[in-house]
Image: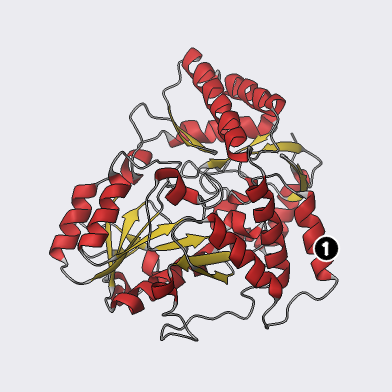
Amino acid sequence: MLYQRSSQLFADAEKVIPGGVNSPVRAFKGVGGTPIFVKSAKGAYLFDEDGNKLIDYINSWGPMILGHAYQPVIDAITERAKSGTSFGMPTELETQIAQLAVSMVPNIDKIRFVNSGTEACMSAIRLARGFTNRNKIIKFAGCYHGHSDSFLIQAGSGASTFGTPNSPGVTPGTAQDTLLVNYNDLDSVRNLFEANKNQIAALIVEPVAGNMGCVSPLPGFLEGLRALCTENNSLLIFDEVMTGFRLAKGGVQELYNIKADIVCFGKVIGGGLPVGAFAARNEIMNYLAPVGPVYQAGTLSGNPLAMAAGLAMLQAINTDANLFENLDKKTAYLEAGIHKVLTQNGVVYTINRVGSMISVHFDASPVVDFQTAKNGDNETFKKFFHGLLKEGVYIAPSAYETWFITDALTYEDLDFTIKAIDKVSKTF
């Protein structure tokens, strides 16, 4: 495949946009080469500026669960735009999507809409601190909750060590209130609670991680987090920006039957437009302004175009009784095919999958946290990525990102992908 126009567009972009992109992973720094510039998309396919057709396995990093340019969503946006695009005032649409979301997700009474997953997680942490009157939070290495200062923290030297900033611009004062532990390591979490008695406002976690590849919680891990938060009067925050409305109608809370105190959403809830949200039971949400003391606001929060898209998407998900079964079957089919060809070709690998989230790691050991995810052979991944791209298959340009499966994929698409992986892996 030729990418001459994409290369020129990237060169033009670099002159006026830092790194030529508006989100770092798009720059292909993890795999090398030049980013692909998309012209359009439909269903399971991307069409780039050079006229190439690609089977898409990132689906805008998750939202396109029913495929690109899903007609009910496009119709809802188009119709809504005729009446205006932004008011900075309440609309009935906001209440309609809120009612539907609350009816679909367990253990929430109220929801507030924002513009991104970053805003949702940032606001959830502020709310948790205000509700508990405590400052410290616990997060897990490898779990990404957006680029808010509190979350850009790397590991210290021990389980009870204060985190240090891993991005310039994040102050040590901010970092000292963020405690960092390893995913799937319940003992380290217990030690942090013991070392910081009555100081921890909340623990935030991707209940199924998607930013170190797909990593599932080990048996008892989420249950243990729930118990520790309850014992210590701290709030459990599920960052379901990726998993919400994707792994089940009610997300991971429904899938694993675990109750979180605050849940953050993004991706699917916006139907492809910039939408985030956070939700909880009444006594927590009523701490938010204007009824409570915790301030949170946004001019474009509840934007009518975004609400129209999100409502159309949630309505489609809510009325499709077979959606999640179909997604699981398609992803399991893909997983089985990848297992077969990589094994036949003598490739060292591990596959992680939960529902319609899946990732391939080029290491034989189980991938259960960020450290084990980093053990993968990144040079092999680079060959894998560019080999698939050449065959017309687009996966995330990073070894640390999950793939997202869309129901628009056909079994013919999956067979094509498996054959492409077979061909590429023979070259390793």
Q: Amino acid at mark 1?
A: Thr
In the picture shown, does residue 217 fall above or below 153?
A: above
Q: Nearer the viewer, residue 424 or 247?
A: 247
* Residue 210 location (% of width, % of height): 46, 47
In the image, taking residue 397 as reference, residue 158 lies left or right, namely left
Where on the picture, by quarter, is residue 42? top right
**Badge 1 density bin: few <14, some 14–19, many ≥20, Cα 10 Å:** some
Question: Residue lying furthest top in this view?
Answer: 344
Q: In which quadrant of the rendered image does the N terminus lie? A: top right
| Residue drawn at 76 percent across, 37 percent down | 53
Q: Nearer the viewer, residue 178 or 126?
A: 126
In the image, taking residue 258 as reference, residue 13 lies left or right, namely right
In the image, taking residue 74 as reference, residue 138 lies left or right, namely left
In the image, taking residue 106 as reference, residue 69 lies left or right, namely right
Q: Nearer the viewer, residue 345 or 15?
A: 345
Element type where label 1 sits in the image: helix
Question: Residue lying furthest right in this view?
Answer: 82
For the image shown, how many numbered marks are present on the structure?
1
In the picture shown, does residue 344 fall above or below 27?
A: above
| Residue drawn at 79 percent across, 56 percent down | 74
Asked whether residue 35 appears in the rendered view, the answer is: no
The residue at which mark 1 appears reads as 78
* Residue 101 location (% of width, % of height): 57, 60
* Residue 348 location (% of width, % of height): 41, 23
| Residue drawn at 50 percent across, 86 percent down | 290
| Residue drawn at 59 percent across, 52 percent down | 26
* Residue 175 location (% of width, % of height): 30, 70
Asked whether residue 420 appears in the rendered view, the answer is: yes
